[in-house]
Image (tube, rainbow, N blue to C red):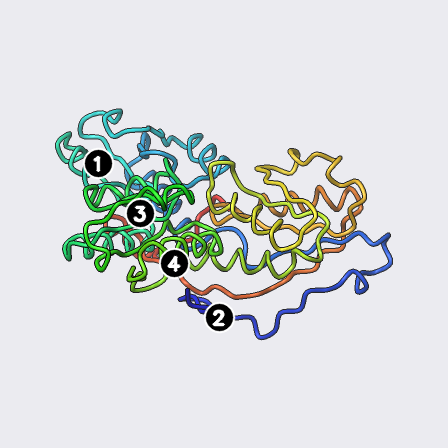
């Protein structure tokens, strides 16, 4: 995987303060990761739903959660969004938004058959992986999709060519896959995985299939990778890393794992500041704070306030990259407000 990410400027220098640099405040400090929080795909998806509400009024239906964050989903629900598991739950002729995680062609077909009006909020980086599946399926490859079973993105991606895609989630899955021609095998991945975990699976696949092809470009999204790099940079200095994110957010879960693997003594995932167990803070001087790619920064600010009230008022930002990327809204919603930002921040 390449070191550079599209739409990302590397930080000119990365300085992670050591505990010796902390002011005399009992040694308590917070290292705040940057980049963190909303990525361009999430911002686009949430704005898509907000614009749909503005243009069409409620109810606006969304298949699955628009993004994997409890606060975002609850806020949109209060505004008149109805979240459904399947398009069959949308009244015929209704307006439905497809979530950032993408859907399979079968879902699109069902929506057409029920005369639903659709707006596609699929992240463009997920769409890129869908196109890769189609390309390699046309060329008659067996496709090894590295990802987590049951994740919505994996279901949508696999659905592009179900007869050619095999899911590789665990090491045991590597041993189970069967291919027709070892010279025509390619691996692709879910966009929100840990880079290290993905490459571990790739190495295992390559042991079985030495001629396996790599994706034409990185599948793991720039935001997922950037947030993991920022956590790695500060984890060894942290007694505790708190990751703001929801339990069903794959990229948020990976940040907890990355923090522990990179040297943090402890790490936990929380949706809100009040979910932090004060027992986690026993004996802790340095707290690392970050958030998943579907998390509004207001939740991080609330956590920083919660920590400050308990003595962790010194906040030092650790910047490893500056993200510049943005995505255009779906064509159904394009107007003069292309530079809009989600209000759920």
Mark on residue 59? none
Mark 1–mark 2 CB contact (< 8 Å): no
Q: Which residue is drawn at 31% across and 34% down?
A: 63
Mark on residue 9? 2
Outermost residue on the bottom side: it is: 12
Q: Of tags 4 and 3, which is closer to the observer?
A: 3
- Which residue is labeled 3 in the image? 122
Tell me which label, 4 or 3, sits earlier in the chain: 3
Spatial CA distance of label 3 from label 1 is 13 Å
Q: Residue at x 49, y 56 (%)?
A: 196
Spatial CA distance of label 1 from label 2 is 37 Å
- Which residue is labeled 1 in the image? 107
Tell me which label, 1 or 2, sits earlier in the chain: 2
- Which residue is labeled 4 in the image? 339
Q: Residue 338 sits in which quadrant?
A: bottom left
Badge 3: few (under 14), some or many (20 or more) residues near its Cα, within 10 Å?
many
Left or right of 282 in this view: 71? left
Left or right of 103 in this view: 280? right
Observer-nearest residue: 17 or 213? 213
Q: Is mark 4 on a helix, strand or loop?
A: loop
Tell me which label, 1 or 4, sits earlier in the chain: 1
Image position, residue 313 (x, y; %)? 76, 51
Q: What element carries label 2?
A: strand
């Amino acid at each position: 995987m390449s070191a550079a990410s599209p739409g990302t400027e590397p930080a000119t220098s990365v300085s992670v303060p050591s505990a010796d640099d902390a002011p005399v405040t009992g040694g308590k400090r917070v290292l705040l990761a940057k980049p963190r929080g909303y990525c361009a795909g999430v911002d686009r998806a949430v704005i898509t739903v907000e614009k749909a509400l503005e243009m069409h009024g409620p109810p606006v239906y969304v298949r699955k959660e628009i993004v994997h964050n409890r606060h975002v989903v609850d806020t949109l629900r209060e505004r008149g969004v109805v979240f459904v598991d399947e398009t069959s739950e949308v009244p015929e002729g209704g307006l439905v938004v497809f979530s950032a995680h993408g859907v399979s062609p079968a879902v699109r077909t069902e929506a057409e058959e029920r005369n639903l009006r659709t707006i596609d909020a699929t992240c463009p980086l997920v769409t890129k992986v869908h196109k890769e599946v189609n390309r390699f399926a046309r060329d008659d490859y067996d496709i090894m999709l590295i990802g987590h079973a049951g994740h919505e993105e994996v279901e949508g991606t696999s659905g592009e060519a179900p007869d050619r895609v095999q899911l590789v989630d665990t090491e045991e899955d590597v041993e189970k896959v069967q291919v027709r021609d070892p010279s025509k095998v390619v691996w692709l991945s879910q966009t929100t995985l840990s880079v290290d975990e993905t490459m571990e699976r790739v190495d295992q696949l390559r042991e079985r299939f030495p001629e396996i092809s790599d994706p034409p470009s990185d599948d793991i999204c720039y935001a997922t990778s950037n947030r993991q790099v920022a956590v790695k940079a500060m984890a060894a200095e942290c007694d505790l890393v708190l990751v703001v994110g929801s339990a069903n957010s794959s990229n948020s879960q990976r940040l907890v794992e990355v923090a522990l693997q990179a040297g943090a003594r402890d790490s936990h995932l929380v949706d809100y500041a009040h979910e932090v167990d004060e027992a986690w803070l026993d004996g802790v001087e340095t707290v690392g704070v970050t958030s998943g790619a579907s998390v509004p920064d207001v939740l991080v600010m609330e956590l920083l306030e919660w920590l400050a009230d308990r003595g962790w008022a010194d906040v030092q930002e650790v910047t490893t990259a500056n993200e510049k990327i943005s995505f255009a809204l779906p064509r159904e919603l394009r107007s003069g407000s292309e530079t809009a930002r989600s209000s759920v921040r």
